[in-house]
């Protein structure tokens, strides 16, 4: 395994911190806390650099709130200064681990994402089924409370196998230990906050251990994962039943994780494989009903905001194009027209 040293100076360099700021602020310029930080930008970045260089840096507290996306999630938002640093860390550390990730891991990676994941699943079903001439079954699983139960000690040791820079490990520890979930106790600290960019990196690093076990330990060919959801395809349902036990054992013993007991299922391709907001069927992709309802609800909210004078019409149009992009990955020509017609109706009612 290739190891890396002398990363700390790259992370805390003024060039990297200012680049991290530009990346961070790109879609947040209307936020009050972001504008306040930008008002004294150079002073804030230089102070962050000095604190890091002297190892005086301490991660701040989090602001927590709930969102519905689509299920309810508890988000913990760090201060702007800390989130800029998260981007700086991600820019240097993520490429080092990216090389070791499997191709069928789709969350928070360049040229990956939900749409690439669902297209890959569709293509794999066709491969396993011989273009729907043979049986195809899918084992679909979800890891229970994944972000909340990531073990700090295990995560730190996984990072330390590749990063041999004490200063960088100090900084990563400062970020990791800035948060503890309700699953922590006196002896075990657990959890990373969903709101941190670094948490997405840590999630991929953590579950890459599982990915490698699936590919090289169990030698499974047709596997793909998006964060804590994963699918394994085979032409034999009994084979899929047989591998559930070693999967559970590895997750529990090596990563202190558990499968969600209500979210382990084996389905035939002709029944539809529900994944990432879509349903893969033998001859087409279908948008999940909940996803469709969420798209219509969000667009209706945008129209209301426009009518109330809170956003320009351009924002409504951008939302429409975004949702049509979501629909374009499934066989939804009629649904596209329905969405456009509904928009016209809301604008003119």
Image (spheres, rainbow, N blue to C red):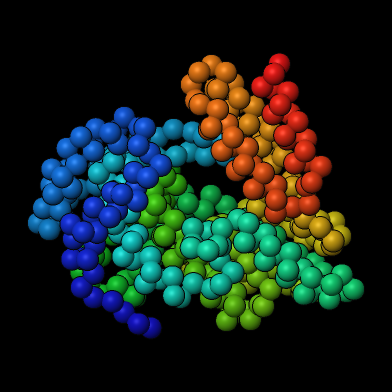
Find residue 227 and report its image quarter: bottom right
Residue sitting at 56 percent across and 58 percent down? 113
> Vertically, is 178 above or below 294?
below
Left/right of residue 282 with respect to residue 322 in the rendered view:
right
> Vertically, is 202 above or below 123?
above
The quadrant in which the N terminus is found is bottom left
Residue 235 position within the rendered picture, expressed as x and y whole percent measured from the top left: 81, 74
Find residue 126 and report its image quarter: bottom right
Residue 102 position within the rendered picture, expressed as x and y whole percent measured from the top left: 54, 73
Residue 8 visible within the image:
yes
Residue sitting at 41 percent across and 60 percent down? 202
Judge by depth and name the residue closer to the eye, 284 or 67: 284
Judge by depth and name the residue closer to the eye, 308 or 284: 308
Residue 61 position within the rendered picture, expressed as x and y whole percent measured from the top left: 28, 39
Residue 153 visible within the image:
no
> Vertically, is 284 above or below 26?
below
The quadrant in which the C terminus is found is top right
Judge by depth and name the residue closer to the eye, 332 or 152: 332
Residue sitting at 44 percent across and 47 percent down? 194
Judge by depth and name the residue closer to the eye, 266 or 136: 136
Left/right of residue 163 with respect to residue 202 in the rendered view:
left
Left/right of residue 13 with respect to residue 237 in the rendered view:
left
Q: How many numbered marks appear?
A: 0
Residue sitting at 44 percent across and 66 percent down? 205
Residue 245 position within the rendered picture, expressed as x and y whole percent measured from the top left: 66, 69
């Amino acid at each position: 395994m290739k190891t890396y040293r002398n990363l700390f100076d790259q992370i805390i360099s003024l060039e990297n911190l200012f680049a991290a700021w530009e990346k961070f602020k790109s879609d947040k310029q209307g936020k009050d806390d972001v504008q306040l930080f930008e008002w004294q930008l150079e002073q804030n970045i230089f102070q962050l650099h000095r604190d890091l260089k002297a190892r005086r840096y301490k991660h701040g507290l989090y602001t927590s709130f709930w969102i519905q996306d689509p299920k309810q999630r508890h988000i913990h938002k760090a201060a702007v200064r800390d989130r800029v640093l998260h981007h700086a860390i991600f820019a240097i550390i993520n490429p080092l681990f990216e090389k070791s990730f499997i191709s069928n891991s789709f969350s928070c990676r360049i040229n990956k994402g939900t749409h690439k994941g669902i297209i890959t699943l569709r293509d794999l079903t066709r491969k396993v089924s011989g273009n729907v001439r043979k049986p195809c079954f899918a084992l679909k699983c979800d890891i229970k409370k994944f972000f909340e139960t990531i073990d700090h000690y295990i995560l730190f040791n996984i990072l330390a196998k590749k990063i041999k820079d004490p200063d960088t490990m100090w900084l990563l520890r400062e970020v990791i230990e800035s948060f503890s979930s309700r699953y922590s106790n006196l002896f075990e600290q657990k959890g990373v906050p969903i709101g941190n960019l670094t948490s997405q990196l840590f999630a991929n690093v953590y579950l890459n251990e599982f990915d490698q076990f699936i590919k090289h330990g169990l030698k499974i060919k047709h596997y793909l994962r998006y964060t804590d959801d994963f699918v394994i395809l085979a032409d034999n349902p009994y084979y899929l039943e047989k591998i559930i036990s070693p999967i559970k054992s590895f997750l529990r013993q090596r990563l202190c994780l558990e499968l969600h007991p209500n979210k382990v299922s084996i389905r035939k391709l002709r029944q539809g494989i529900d994944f990432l907001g879509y349903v893969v069927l033998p001859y087409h992709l279908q948008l999940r009903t909940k996803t469709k309802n969420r798209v219509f609800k969000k667009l209706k909210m945008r129209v209301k905001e426009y009518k109330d004078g809170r956003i320009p019409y351009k924002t409504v149009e951008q939302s429409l194009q975004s949702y049509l992009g979501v629909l374009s990955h499934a066989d939804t020509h009629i649904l596209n027209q329905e969405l456009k017609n509904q928009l016209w109706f809301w604008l003119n009612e």
